[in-house]
Amino acid sequence: MPRQADPVVETPAGAVRGVRDGSGERFRALPYAAAPVGAGRFAAPAPHPGWSGVRDGSRPSPTAPQPARDFGRLDMAPYFGPGWVPGAEYLTVDVRTPAADGGRRPVMVFVHGGGFVTGSNRAALYGGGAFARDDVVLVTVNYRLGVPGFLDLAGAPANRGLLDVLAALRWVQGAVAAFGGDPGNVTVFGQSAGATLVGALLATPEAGGLFRRAVVQSGNGCGAFTPEQAQRVTAAVAAALGVEPTVEAFAPVPDERFVAVLPALAGLDLRTGTATDPLAGLSPFSLVLPVQPADALADGPARDVDLLIGTTTEEGRLYLVPQGGLESTTDADLLAVAARVHADPEAALAVQRAARPDATPGELRSAVLGRALFEAGTTRLAQAHARLSGGRTHRYSFGYRSTAVGGRLGAAHTVELPFVFDVADEPWLHGDTGLLGPDPAPAGLAARVHGAWVAFAGTGDPGWAAYDPRRPVVEAFGG
């Protein structure tokens, strides 16, 4: 039987040729905005000029400038992807579709995590074959990171990485029908920093009409920096570079220097008279907003958007276990972390100790990190959305414990992702240094989690009762 020709799709910017495989069709490196270069790195995303002829959509795009990340004894390459792959045209999306046939399938748009400084849609976890298999069109997004994406700079629009995601969603509205997707049934979902961006979209007026549903996986509805905190970061970056904190001064600085300056920001104290550090010192970049998204949902499309939201049960272990921090944490280390994220750290630790009287300092530190980084902001966002939307909120908790790093990783941050993308049986996720550890994934868990996400994208109902602050139903996975 002769091989079918590779699929070609006409988009508003030009024609693109993809590849066909066992999961359907895949189109890679599709630009949704012009390449950000020079001063354009600090501007709002501009329209792509388009192309003539048929563009090759078989190869992945470059990635945003970013540093390498080391998680000690844990192999996080499936999560972070290849790191920085240089090239100007990285404001791109990949599309996975059952068939570019003009069908009207649910569309899911994924926004990756990585602490606002790393990650890309090239990560192995996000291949998306299972979504195409289940008749969903998956779009994965690259966006600006670090200094170009999130540094608050005089003369530049704030939150440029968020503006990139908005531009990608506008691209989806104009182009996804040609890939077999329904632009009227778009779910935007993200994890970690990507989930925090999705939460912000719910409070962003310009996001109205761009998506119908949202999934916030281990994000933080209260994770934005205040303008005062952002200015501390800006001053530190400008000082490290030896330039004035303006677009004009930053425009000629090469991306290599923006990446190289990041270690100088480690440990920057962002506590102010009115705010603690919402990222506990783990990243010098976040959204910059005068009001947290959880407190500003009425300003955006949240009222009309279905929301699926949750966390893992041991989020903070990712930041301690692979580096040996669970065992080495002292009482002084514990107090220092609590002081970053609580106005009254001693009182906060007293609550944690009362709830876990036998916990070690490392276990308490993990709990403090998990609550501050993800759980508190998730609860606040879920409650605010439930009050505003009236029955359109669903909440989950993911408790399956990875056996990685000698069985200690547990239900840490990121452990739910292989189950959402239904790749939990892949060998590259297993072994003692693999995200899921040496034990096989439990039978049926990936099908259940992935199936809930697909059902939610299709109908707004993941399969359990809606969340109400007065009746807080939380669906438990694997715990």
Image (cartoon, rainbow, N blue to C red):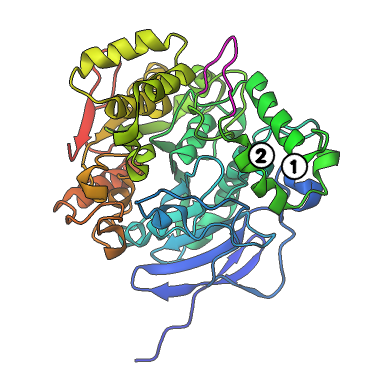
Graded by Cα atoms within 10 Å as few (under 14), some (14 to 19) or many (20 or more), the crowding at tag 2 reads many
Residue 382 in view in this figure:
no
Magenta: main secondary structure: loop
111 up-or-down from 224: above or below? below
| Picture residue at 36% right of the left edge, 20% below the top | 390
User: Which image quadrant for residue 315?
Assistant: top left
317 up-or-down from 336: above or below? below
Q: Which residue is mark 1?
A: 42
Over which residues does the magenta segment extend?
268-277
Disc 2 to disc 1: CB gap under 8 Å? yes
Q: Secondary structure at mark 1?
A: helix
Q: Magenta span has 275? A: yes
Q: Nearer the viewer, residue 97 or 395?
A: 395
Graded by Cα atoms within 10 Å as few (under 14), some (14 to 19) or many (20 or more), the crowding at tag 1 reads many
Q: In 3D space, how far apart are the residues under numbered discs 2 and 1 (Cα atoms)?
A: 7 Å
Q: Amino acid at mark 2?
A: Arg
Q: Amino acid at mark 1?
A: Phe
Specify the quadrant that holds the C terminus.
Answer: top left
Q: Secondary structure at mark 2?
A: helix
User: Which image quadrant for residue 478?
Assistant: top left
Q: Provide residue 392's location: percent of width, then percent of height.
A: 35, 27
Q: Provide residue 79's location: percent of width, then percent of height.
A: 41, 52
Q: Provide residue 336's location: percent of width, then percent of height.
A: 44, 21
